[in-house]
Amino acid sequence: MTITLERAARGATRLRLTHDFADAAHRDHHVQGWRYQLSVFANVVANTLHADPAARVDAWFSIWSESNARAVDAALATIASPDVRVRDRFSCLEGAADVGEHIRASQRYMPGVRLQRDGQVEHCQGTVLAHWTATGPDGRERGRGTNVFTLDAEERIESVTGFWRPA
């Protein structure tokens, strides 16, 4: 067996395993076992790298209630990639500056609305699924939905895709 490591996109590393058998049938018998073992390894690495994805998700949702523009920008710089992408029914955004402006606009048009996580997050190899609720200043639910987050190798949010369900 030969193992090689190669640099891949976005700072990742690609692992290649090559079985050198004279008999192709014998070699091919090992393929699915290695797929399984590598997926176990990928989950261990991702769970170590992204040890607390709920904290990242909660920080994301709390930014949407922050009224101080500098605090929004500082929080985004901490938890999101500079080229973060956001997609939902109201957004098609590229970059932290665009997201920051959108957050400020959402507060002008939906003052007092708060987003908060609803339940546990699910995490698989850098992709996080989180359900949320939006409540108005009166505490009444205004909407709910689910966001799909992708996290980068620096534990920052790389992209968010949101699915809204009106209340």
Image (cartoon, grey):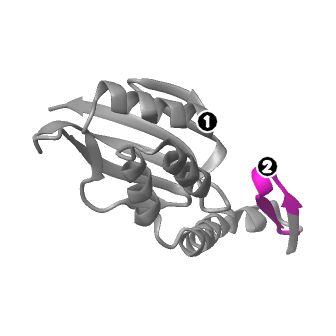
Residue 112, label in figure: none
| Residue occupying the point 54% across, 46% down | 70
In the rendered view, tell whether residue 96 sits above or below residue 153. above
Based on the picture, tell me whether residue 12 belongs to the magenta stretch.
yes
List the residue tagged with mark 1: 97
Would you identify the image quadrant in which residue 6 lies? bottom right
Distance from disc 1 to disc 2, alpha carbons, whole Å, reads 24 Å
- Image: 101 above or below 18: above
Mark 2, residue position = 9
User: Could you tell me if the residues under marks 1 and 2 are in contact, i.e. CB atoms within 8 Å?
Assistant: no
Q: Please provide the residue range marked out in magenta.
A: 6-20
- Location of the C terminus (image quadrant): top left
Residue 1 lies, in percent from the top left, at 85, 75
Q: Which of 167 and 33 is in front in this view?
A: 167
Does residue 37 sit above or below 103 in this rendering? Answer: below
Q: Which of 122 and 117 is in front in this view?
A: 117
> Would residue 64 be found to the left or right of residue 157 on screen?
left
How many other residues sit within 10 Å of disc 2, few (<14), some (14-19) or many (≥20)? few
Instruction: Name the residue type under label 2.
Output: Ala
Q: Nearer the viewer, residue 8 or 66?
A: 66
Q: Can you tell which quarter of the image residue 146 is in?
A: top left
Would you place residue 139 above or below residue 107 in this image?
A: below
Neighbour tally class for label 1: few under 14, some 14-19, many 20 plus, Cα within 10 Å: some
Q: Please state the horizontal and vertical placement of residue 101, each as a whole percent of the image.
A: 52, 31
Q: Position of residue 76 (x, y in %)?
A: 55, 49
**Residue 86 place in picture, x, y as percent:** 51, 35
Does 147 appear in magenta?
A: no
Identify the element where label 1 is drawn: helix
